Every structure is written in C-alpha cells, then in structure tokens.
Image (cartoon, rainbow, N blue to C red):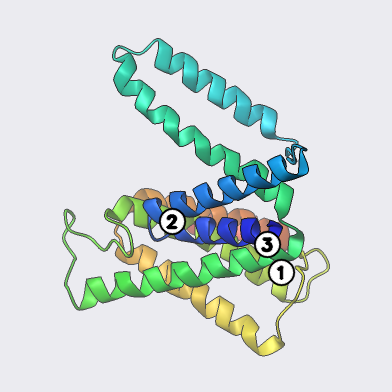
Amino acid sequence: MEKIIRWCLLLAIAATLVSVFLSGLFLGCASLAWAWQCVSRRRLTLDWPRYYPFILAFLVSAVVAILFSENLLESARYAKKFVHFFAITLVFTYFDRQLVVRTTKVLFLVAGSSALIGIFQYFVLHKVELLDRVTGFMSHWMTFSGQLMIVSVVLAGYVISLFPSRIAFRPLNIPARGTHWLWLALLLLLLFALLLTMTRSAWVGVILGLVLVASVRNYRLVLVGVLLIVMV
C-alpha cells in the first residue's frame, strides 16, 4: 500500500505541470490509499514538517477572510484548494530523500517537455502576440511562465550540486559525469522557453532565484548578479 501511495504522490506532483485535474485525481488516490492503510492498521500515520504551523496560520487567516468577505458562498468555493496542503504531510510521511530526488527529476523532464511545446508554439504556430503567447501544457501563459520560473530555479540548484564544490549540496544517486551537461542543457532550454513567454514578472523572479542559487555556490557571485541586474 505504501508503494501505491508513493507512486500516486509522485504522479500527482508531476501532473501539476500538465493538468490540475490529473494532479487532483492522483492526489485523491493517494489520500484514499492512505486512509485505507490507517483503517487497516488502526493507527493514524502522518508526519508533520516543522514549518507546518505557518501553513496552519495561513489557512486560519484564509478562513477568516472568507467569513468576512462580501460574498460568503462565492468565497467558500476556494476552501476546496486547502486539500492540496494535505499533500505536504503525505510527502513528509512517505517520501525519503531518494524518492524526493527521483520526483524532482521527473518534474524537470515534464517541464522540459512543456518547454519544447512552448518553443514549437512560438516558432511554428507563431503565438507571438501579447494576448496570444506560448502556454506549453497549460491554458495560460502566466501559469506556464510561473511553472518555468520555479522549476528553473530548482533545476539550477540541482545543477550546481552536480559539479565539485566545497559547499555545494550532494544529492543521492549522482549521475555519471556526462549527464551533468544534459541537465545544464535542460536548464538553458527552460530559460529560453521562459524568455519566449514575454512575462517580465517571471523573468524578474527567475533572475532573483538564480542569484540566490549562485550565492550558495559562492557569495561573491551575488555581487556579479546584482551588477548584471542593474545593467539589464
């Protein structure tokens, strides 16, 4: 049962870059499998991250905002999104570091596929207008650019961990040296697709994120990044 829960969670996370419906479907399957396991074992199995009190504070503030909104019924519809926070506890309960790395790699590959679709849309379908931009797997360019922004920063952090450094983090199952450059090429692909989205807010976000990642490698790179930002 634990293997089913892990696979459903992996698919739910990967599907966030493809379809909200599919992501919710796999998360629902993982939740049902977890509930069945708890009933069969007659024991509640959940691990809570240390930062979860901040999430609970956010949920409480959101509920208060709903209660004091002008249209209570309309605002209450958004409470259904709270179920996604339950995925955090499931991940902390059933994921080990090896599975985290595997899931992250799947996310990188799915984002790369979405980026290729975006590049195809730009150069072949000529989605180059401000009101008709590239969207990848998504239905709107803002969602697409936001996904590329987040995954690019995470991928940049993974890439610097693959190259020797005294302070770089070393993930489990480090691939052979030749594949290091493939992950770097994938990062450049994501950044190129992000450029084609013409979404300036996402550009700013990814630049600041990359500067932060560079500071992990060498704090002096932050100064270089700040200078480049000022120049741009």
Q: Earlier in the sequence, mark 1 or mark 3?
A: 3
Distance from label 1 to label 3 (Cα)?
Answer: 28 Å
- Relative to residue 154, is residue 75 depicted above or below? above
x, y percent for residue 104: 60, 64
Given the image, on which type of amino acid does mark 3 rest? Lys
Q: What whole-number distance in Å separates the C-alpha atoms at marks 2 and 3?
A: 27 Å
- Front: mark 2 or 1: 2
Q: What type is the residue that disc 2 sits on? A: Gln
Q: Residues within 10 Å of mark 3 (few under 14, many from 20)?
A: few
Q: Which residue is the extreme one toward the front?
A: 40
Residue in view at x 63 percent, y 42 percent: 35
Q: Where residue 161 is drawn, which disc sits there?
A: 1
Disc number lying in front (1 or 3): 3
**Residue 111, position as x, y percentages in the image:** 45, 67
Q: Which quarter of the image is occupied by the N terminus?
A: bottom right
Where's residue 66, x and y in %? 41, 17
Q: Quadrant of the C terminus?
A: bottom left
Mark 2 highlights which residue? 147
Residue 3's disc is 3
The answer to which of 202 and 67 lies nearer the viewer is 67
Q: Mark 2 touching mark 1, by CB under 8 A?
A: no
Question: Which residue is at a point 53% across and 56% down the rendered structure image?
Answer: 13
Residue type indicated by callout 1: Ser
* Secondary element at tag 1: helix
User: How many discs appear?
Assistant: 3
User: At 58% across and 55% down in the image, what residue appears?
Assistant: 9
Is residue 6 or residue 216 the one in the foreground?
Answer: 6
Residue depicted at 45% across the width and 72% down the height: 112
The nearer-to-camera label among 2 and 3 is 3
